Image: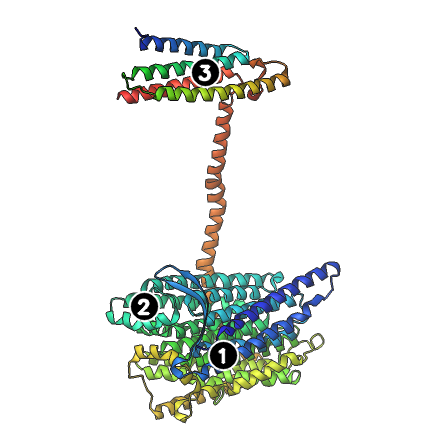
Amino acid sequence: MTVPTEHLLILAGILFAIGVGGFCLRRNLIVVLMSVELMLNAANLTFIAGSRHHSALGDPALDGALFAIFVIVVAAVEAAVGLALVIALYRRKQTVSLDSLDELGD
Amino acid sequence: MPHTDWLWWLLLLPLLGSAACGVLHFLTLKARRSDANAKGPSALAWPIAAGAMGAAFVISLLALNGLRALDASARVLESSAWSWIDTGNMAIDVSLVVDPLSSVLLLVVTGVGFLIHVYAGGYMKGDPGYAKFFAYLNLFVAAMLMLVLSSNLLGLFIGWEGVGLASYLLIGFWYEKGWPAEAGQKAFVVNRIGDACFLIGSFLLVQLFGTLDLSDIGTAVPALLTGGEHSFQLALAALLLFGGCCGKSAQLPLFVWLPDAMAGPTPVSALIHAATMVTSGVYLVVRLNPLFAASPGILFFIGVVAAATAFIAGTSALAQRDLKGVLAYSTVSQLGYMFLGLAAGAWSSAIFHLVTHAFFKALLFLAAGSVIHGMHDEKDMHKMGGLRRHMPRTYVTFLAGAAALSGLPLLSGFFSKDEILAMNFANGGMYYGLWAVGVLTAAITAFYSWRMVGLVFFGEERFDAAKVHPHESPGSMTGPLFVLAFLSIAGGLIGLPPVLHLPHVLHSWLEPVTAPGTAILHGDHAPHLSHAAEWVLLGLGSVIALVFAHKGFYAYKNGKEQDAAFAAKQPAVYAQLEKAWSIDRTYTFWIVQPIKLAAFVIAVVVDQFAIDGVVNGAARLARSSALQLRKLTDGGVANYGLWMGAGAAVLAVIWIAGGAA
C-alpha cells in the first residue's frame, strides 16, 4: 500500500501555498527566507513524486531525484548567502523587518 | 644574380633624412618654447636632407652602371625583401626593381631632386618651418622612389599615395595664410577621384591576370589578347588606370588642382608639381605599355584628352599675370604633350619629354623662385620688368629655360617635342588632328614663354623702386640654376632624331621595356617617316618656335600694354583665358556648391532632426517608461514575489496552452 501520487502533489501544493503566503505576508526577513525554503521543498516533493510515478519495478527513473539534489544544493547556498545578508542587514539597521528596506523605490 | 641589397638604400636614405629633419624640427620647437627667436638646430636640416639626396643620386648612378654591365635583354636588378601577401593563388612581395625605365626616372628624381634640395636651402632660409620643410621634401622623395622602384602595382600605389600626401603637406606648408591649406585640400580631394579609378583598375587587373607584378602583367597581355573575349576588360582596366593618371598628372578633367598647388613654396612647385610627381602618370603608362597598347581605342582617347589639355592649358597660360601661374598652366600643357606621345605609342618619346621637361621646367620654376625671392614675394609680372639688370644670373638661366620650353632649335625641348609630334604625324589617320593641335600648342608655348621673359626681365621697372630693391639670389640658389640651364640646353643630346644618323641613346636604352607594347600595337610594321618628311617637320617646328618666340618677346619687351590691348580688343576671350576657360568655376558651381549645399542640408535637417530625433526619442522613451516602471520597485519584497509569481503563472499558462495545441 503506497501513498498515491495525487496525494503527494496535493501536499506539495499546500506546502507551496504556505510558502507563498509566508513570503508575501510576513515582514520578518528570516521567516521570508524560511518560506522560500518551504517553496523549494514543495518543488522537491513534486520532483520526487513525478520520479516515482514514472518508475517501473527494477527500472527506477532517477531524473526527478537528480533535480531534487540540485535544488537542495542550490537551497543550501541560497540559505548561506541569505542568512549572511540578514546578519549584515541586522548589523546596519538593528532590525530584520522588510518594512525598513524600501529606500530603492523612493 | 648580382648582389642587389644596396638598392634599399635608395628608399632608406631619404626616409632617414626625413626622420632626422623631423627630429630637428621638434628640437627647434622645444628651443623656441623658452626663447621665441631661438634658431635651434634647424640649420642642420639642409646638409642632412641634401646629403641624403646626393647619396641617393650616387646610388642611382651605381644602379645605372650596374645595368649597363648587364646584357641588353637582361637589364634588371631586383631585390626582394620579404613576401608581403601570399594568398595561395596571388603573391605580393615587397621588392624593388631597377630596369632601364626606372633607372632613367631614378636619375631624374634624385638628380633634379638634389639640385632642388640645394636651392631650397637658400630659398627657405629664415622660415620658421625650415627643418619641417626638409623633412617633408625628403619624405616626398622616398615615396617617389617607392613609386618608381616597386616591382608591383600595390607598392607603386603606396608610393603614389605617399607622393600625394607629401604634395598635400607641402602645398599647405604655409597653412597659416589660409589659402595654401585650402589649395592642399583641393589637390588631395581631386587626386582622390583619380586614385579611386586607379584602385578599381588594379582590382580589374587582379581579376584578369591574378597578379599585380608589373612585368608579369606585361608579359601576360598578348596571351589574353589572342583569345579576344577579354579585350573589353583590358580596355576598361587601361581606361581606369588612365583615370588615375588624369588626377596625378593633371589632365582634363582633373587638372584644376595643379594651378592652385602653386600656393606651396617654389622649390616644391619645381620638384613635385613640375619635375617628378606629376609625371608619375606618364611613368605608369610606359610601365604598363603592353596593357595600353592592347586597346588602341583607349590610346586614341588618351590622345584626345591630352591634346585638349595641352591646348586649353597652353591658351590659359597666355593670359596669366602670376609668374608661377604661367608656369603651372605650362606644366599642365607639357604633361599633355607627354600623354600625346603615349597616345601615339611613342613610349620612349614621352619619357624623353619627361626628362627634358624635368630639366627646363624645374629650371624655370627655380629661376622664377629666385625672381620672387629677389622681388620680396611679388608674383605679378605686371609689377616686374627690367630685372635683367638686377639679377643677371637668374636672367641668363631663365632665358635658357624659356628657350628650351619654347622649343628653339637644338635645345632639349625642341628635340623631345618634335619627336612626339613626328610620331603622331607618322601614325596618320585621325592622329593628324592630334598633331595639328600639338603644333598649334607649340606656337602658343613659344609665345607665352617669351612673354614671360619680356614682362619679367625687359621694359621699364614697374615696381616701386623706393620700396622694392631687387637683388640677385645667393650662390646656393644660382648654382643649381646653372646646372639645370646646362641640362636644359644639352639634354636633347640623349635623343637625337633619326635623320641625323646619330644614336638615339634614350630610345635604345628603353628598348627592352617599350618593345612589348610596340610589338602589340604595330606588329612588325612600326609607322615610319621618310627622311624628307622628318626634315620638313623639324623645319616646321623650328620656324614655328622661332616666329612665335619672336612675336611673344617683341610684344612684351617694352611693357605690359599688350595685355591691356588684347583685353580691350577681345574682352570675352581674354576673360575666359584668364579664368582658364572657367573650368574650375564650372566645377565650383555645378559640383562643389551642390555638394556643399547637400552637406549643409544633411547637417542641419537630416542630422539635427531625423537622426538626432531618433536618438533623443529613444532616450526619452526609455526615460519616460522607466519613470512608470520604477513604481513597481517600491522596495516591498512581497510585491516582487507577487510579480514574479504572476510572471511564472503567465508563462505556465502559455506553456500549457502551447503544449495543448
Verify CB contact (< 8 Å) between mark 1 and mark 3: no
**Identity, as a three-letter code, of the amino acid under mark 2:** Ala
Residue furthest to the front in view is A58
The chain carrying label 2 is B
Q: Nearer the viewer, residue B246 or B120?
A: B120
Q: Position of residue B434 (x, y in %)?
A: 36, 78
| Colour scheme | rainbow
**Identity, as a three-letter code, of the amino acid under mark 3:** Leu
> Dot 3, how many residues are within 10 Å of its Cα: few (below 14), some (14-19), or many (20+)?
some
Q: Which residue is mark 3?
A: B642
Q: Position of residue B58 (x, y in %)?
A: 55, 79
Q: The residue tagged with tag 3: helix, strand or loop? A: helix
Q: Which residue is mark 1?
A: B63
Q: Is residue B101 above or below residue B209?
A: below
Is B318 placed left or right of B524 in the picture?
Answer: right
Q: Which residue is mark 2?
A: B235
Q: Position of residue B440 (x, y in %)?
A: 42, 81
Q: Is residue B383 above or below residue B197?
A: below
Residue A70 in sight: yes
Q: Is residue B154 above or below residue B442?
A: above
Residue furthest to the right in view is B35
The chain carrying label 1 is B
Q: The residue tagged with tag 1: helix, strand or loop? A: helix
Mark 1 and mark 3 on one chain:
yes
